[in-house]
C-alpha cells in the first residue's frame, strides 16, 4: 500500500458514482456542497468529479486557497521588503505572480530584486544562516497546515540565535469563514467537504460548532478521487437521514483531536488576530499574528513596513469566486484578459486557485 | 499550498528524516509530530515537515467500506 494508488481505482470510483446517482434520486431539493481547500479544488477538476455527479448534486469552491484570500496590501508589503538591497525575500512559489497594486514579486525580481523561492521555511532559515550580512524575510501565508511549519522555523531561528530571520505573517484559520458562508442564504449550502490536511492539525472536533450551530453536515475528506466520492456519499447520507454532524472520511490521516504537538508549537508563536479576507472582508479572530514576545522575528514590527492602502483591479471578480458565488467561467475576464501567464486576479495565479484549476482542466 | 504528499520514511536521525515517493526523496523534520515515527512508516510531508502519520489499518478499513457499500452487483 502506498496510500495513493488504491484510492484512484477507476472501477471503484465508477461504482461510487452509480451509488451517488441512486441516492440523489431521493433528495427533496438539489444539494450544494462546498470545499474550502485548494487541493480539493484541483483534485475535483483534475479527476473530472463533477462529470460523475447527477445534476442535483453541485460542487462549489470556497475560500480555500490561502494565496487567493490574501489581500492586495500584503503583496504590496512583500514588494516593499524587496526595495532594500540588504533584504532577501523568501517565499513559496505560489506568491510570486500574485498582482499587487502596481507590480508583482516576479516583476520586481526581473528588475533585480532578490526574491527566492523555497520549498520549506527550513530552507529560508538556512538562507539566513548562510547570509549573515543580509536580512531574510519569509512570506508567511497559509492555513493551519502551513502555520505550524512557519512557527517551527521561528523557533529554530530563536534557538540558533539568528538576528536576520523575519516572517511577514498573514496566516488564517478556516472554521469561522465556513460559519460565515454557511449562514449566507444566497449560497444555501447543504454540506461541507472539510479540508484534509488542515484537519490533520486541527482535527475533526474543530468543525463540531459549525455542524451543530449551523445545522450543516461536515465530512473531513481526503484528496484522492475515491475519497472525494465517498465524502459526497457521506454528505448525501446525512441529508437523507436529516442529520448534521461531523464525520471523518479521511481517517487514515485525520483524528478527532488532530495534531496537538503541531498546534502547541503554533500557539507558542502565534496568537489570534482579526484578518482581512479577499471577498469576505475583515473577520474577527480569523488571523494569526506573531506574539509580541517574538516581535524581533515579525517583519512588520521589526522592519516597520508600511504601504499605502492597496488598489485591486476594479474588474477583478476574485472576491465573488472565493465566496462560491461566481463560477470562473462566468467571470468576464476568465481566459480573455486573465490567464495564468498574465493574471489579473490571485485565483488565476496560484496552482490551487479555482480559476487556475478551471483554466487547466475545466474547459 | 496545503499540498501534502504521502511519503515513506527511509531513514531517521533525531528529528530529521529522509522520505521517499515515486523514487524522489526529500529531507523533512518530524518535530511537529507527536507520534513515534519509524523507518518504513508513511507520513504526510508538507513544506519540509511531517504533519501526520498514515494509519494502514484505517486506510484498509476505508477501502473495505468503499468496496462493500459500492459493490457492482449492488448497482443492478
Image (cartoon, coloured by chain):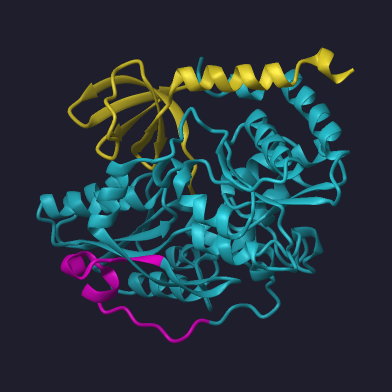
Chain colours: A cyan, B yellow
- Locate residue A210, reporting x and y percent: 55, 56
Residue A322 rendering spot, x and y as whole percentages = 64, 63
Q: Is residue A55 above or below residue A330?
A: above
Is A311 rendered above or below residue A52? Answer: below
Image x and y of residue A42, in percent: 64, 44
The residue lying at 57 percent from left, 60 percent from top is A213
| Residue range (magenta) | A287-310
Q: Residue furthest front?
A: A242
Left or right of residue A265, residue A281 in this image = right
Magenta segment: does it hold A295? yes
Answer yes or no: is residue A79 visible: yes
The image quarter in which residue A275 lies = bottom left
Nearest the eye: A45 or A116? A45
Q: Is residue A140 magenta?
A: no
Between residue B27 and residue A116, name the one nearer to us: B27
Left or right: where A195 falls relative to A363: left
Residue A65 lies in what quarter of the image? bottom right
Give the side of residue A240 with respect to residue A41, left or right. Answer: right
Residue A335 position, x and y percent, is: 76, 59
Q: Residue at x 33, y 38 (%)?
A: B49
Which of these two is toward me, B58 or A74? B58
* Left or right: A171 as drawn, with respect to B36: right
Height in image: A70 above or below B29?
A: below
Q: Nearer the viewer, residue A46 or A290?
A: A290
Amino acid at each position: 500500500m502506498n496510500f495513493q494508488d488504491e484510492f484512484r481505482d477507476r472501477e471503484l470510483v465508477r461504482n461510487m458514482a452509480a451509488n451517488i446517482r441512486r441516492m440523489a434520486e431521493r433528495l427533496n431539493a438539489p444539494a450544494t456542497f462546498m470545499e474550502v481547500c485548494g487541493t480539493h479544488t484541483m483534485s475535483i477538476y483534475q479527476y473530472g468529479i463533477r462529470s460523475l455527479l447527477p445534476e442535483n448534486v453541485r460542487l462549489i469552491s470556497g475560500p480555500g486557497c490561502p494565496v487567493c484570500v490574501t489581500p492586495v496590501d500584503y503583496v504590496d508589503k512583500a514588494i516593499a521588503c524587496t526595495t532594500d538591497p540588504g533584504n532577501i525575500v523568501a517565499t513559496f512559489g505560489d506568491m510570486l505572480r500574485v498582482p499587487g497594486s502596481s507590480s508583482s514579486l516576479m516583476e520586481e525580481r526581473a528588475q533585480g530584486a532578490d526574491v527566492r523561492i523555497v520549498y520549506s521555511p527550513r530552507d529560508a532559515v538556512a538562507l539566513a544562516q548562510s547570509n549573515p550580512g543580509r536580512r531574510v524575510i519569509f512570506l508567511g501565508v497559509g492555513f493551519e497546515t502551513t502555520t505550524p511549519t512557519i512557527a517551527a522555523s521561528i523557533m529554530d531561528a530563536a534557538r540558533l540565535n539568528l538576528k536576520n530571520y523575519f516572517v511577514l505573517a498573514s496566516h488564517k484559520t478556516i472554521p469561522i469563514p465556513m460559519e460565515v458562508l454557511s449562514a449566507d442564504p444566497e449560497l444555501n449550502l447543504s454540506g461541507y467537504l472539510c479540508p484534509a490536511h488542515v484537519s490533520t492539525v486541527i482535527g475533526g472536533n474543530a468543525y463540531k460548532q459549525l455542524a451543530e450551530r449551523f445545522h450543516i453536515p461536515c465530512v473531513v475528506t481526503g484528496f484522492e478521487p475515491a475519497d472525494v466520492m465517498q465524502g459526497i456519499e457521506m454528505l448525501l447520507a446525512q441529508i437523507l437521514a436529516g442529520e448534521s454532524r461531523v464525520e471523518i472520511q479521511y481517517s487514515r490521516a485525520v483524528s478527532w483531536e488532530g495534531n496537538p504537538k503541531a498546534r502547541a508549537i503554533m500557539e507558542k508563536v502565534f496568537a489570534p488576530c482579526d484578518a482581512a479576507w479577499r471577498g469576505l472582508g475583515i473577520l474577527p479572530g480569523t488571523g494569526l499574528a506573531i506574539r509580541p514576545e517574538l516581535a524581533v522575528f515579525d517583519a512588520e514590527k521589526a522592519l516597520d513596513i508600511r504601504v499605502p492602502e492597496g488598489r485591486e483591479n476594479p474588474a477583478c471578480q476574485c472576491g465573488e469566486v472565493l465566496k462560491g458565488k461566481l463560477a470562473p467561467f462566468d467571470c468576464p475576464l476568465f481566459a480573455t484578459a486573465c490567464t495564468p501567464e498574465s493574471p489579473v486576479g490571485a485565483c488565476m495565479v496560484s496552482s490551487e486557485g479555482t480559476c487556475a484549476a478551471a483554466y487547466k482542466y475545466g474547459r | 499550498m496545503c499540498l501534502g504528499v504521502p511519503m515513506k520514511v527511509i531513514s531517521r536521525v533525531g528529528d530529521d528524516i529522509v522520505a521517499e515517493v515515486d523514487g524522489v526523496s526529500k529531507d523533512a523534520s518530524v518535530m511537529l509530530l507527536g507520534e513515534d515515527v519509524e523507518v518504513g512508516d508513511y507520513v504526510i510531508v508538507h513544506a519540509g515537515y511531517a504533519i501526520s502519520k498514515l494509519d494502514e489499518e484505517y486506510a484498509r478499513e476505508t477501502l473495505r467500506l468503499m468496496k462493500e457499500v459500492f459493490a457492482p452487483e449492488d448497482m443492478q
